[in-house]
Amino acid sequence: MSQEKYVVVLGYIKTLEPLLITYRKGVGGYLETLKYIPSSTLLGAIISYLASKKGVNEVLSYNRFYNMYGKAFLTSAFPINKELTRIDDPLPLPLKTIAKDKENGKHVSTAILWANFFEHKEQDTLNYLVSLDYKVGYGFWYLDSTVIKSYFPKTISYTHVALRYDSRTSLEGYLYTVEAINTNETFVFKACISENLLNELKEEVPIKVKMGSARSRGYGLVEITLSSELSYEDYINERLSTLRSEENKYITIDFVSETSLKKANELGSQAIYMKPIITRTKRYYNGTFHIKTLVEPGTTIVLKNRNNLKELIKHELFPHEIHDQIFFAPSLFQINNPIHYCEVKS
């Protein structure tokens, strides 16, 4: 890390208008929104907001923004129904490792169970894994005391008619439906940012800014607030203190931002178990569409605990240098989410 001081902050986003983060166009003109806010969308909105406040009349690249304010590494923002208690609490994630115990109806993360099976090949473990119900639906999973729960943001659908510019009338195929995240939904994110940028943001919060698609058509207005902060060094020390007090055989890594496939494979090269969520993302930059394979938030990796926690924690929220002008994929993650270690009890 450079000599510049960095701070870990916890932030919240509240939707003031329906929010449309377009990622899929269905058959018959159906636009479906992502249910979380990607880190690239969040950082792009902040860059745009600060550029407009400073009177910059051009699109700032990530590198130029870093030169002006210092680096900013943001997780994606995930829907939540109550605020986090501590800045190092895990974020609610769209995990793919969750299943339901058919006997008691409780949810369990299968990540550690699969790692244990792959390492020891115990038949009882496999029998239990096979007995689970994996049809639990899509949601953002978190631990409430000792119970695994999920939250799903409320959405709203609108049907629009696109008009021809020449006659201002509609034709067949011009009818389309939009699914957007409803107003008054709250999202939570974490960031590791320079003190310079933090001071700049503190002067502006709450920040009201547009993000996502269809911003000129009544979509995308959000309010960004910052609730707590901790120096980067204190954050590392607190995380180390917490994790060293736990006697876990395995280390779990959950990605909380978009991640390059190369970085995910690098971390997963020593994995006992990996549950990736892979997507092909298209971005428009400098007059051309670019396509890249990324790993989405919610991807889980399980490693053998080899006492390399400090090195991993150092890069939870502060990755290596990023010089990607097109894709913001900071490869942020959280270690040892307690949801993976919660035992199912009858």
Image (cartoon, rainbow, N blue to C red):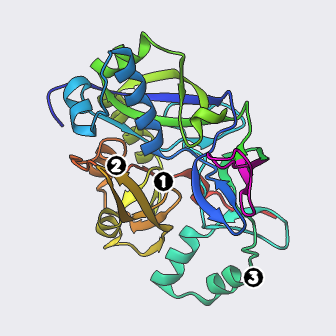
Q: Amino acid at mark 2?
A: Pro
Q: Amino acid at mark 3?
A: Ser
Q: CA distance from mark 2 to mark 3?
A: 37 Å
Q: CA distance from mark 2 to mark 1?
A: 19 Å
- Give the image location of residue 92, x and y in percent: 61, 47
Residue of label 1: 336
- Give the image location of residue 148, x and y in percent: 71, 53
Residue of label 3: 131
Q: Earlier in the sequence, mark 2 or mark 3?
A: 3
Q: Is residue 275 left or right of residue 26?
A: left
**Residue 77, placed above or below residue 279:** above
**Residue 4, placed above or below residue 152:** above
Few, some or many residues within 10 Å of mark 2 (<14, 14–19, 20+): many
Few, some or many residues within 10 Å of mark 3 (<14, 14–19, 20+): some
Residue span colored magenta: 159-179
**Residue at image point 43% right, 54% down:** 258
Residue with the most extreme front position: 167
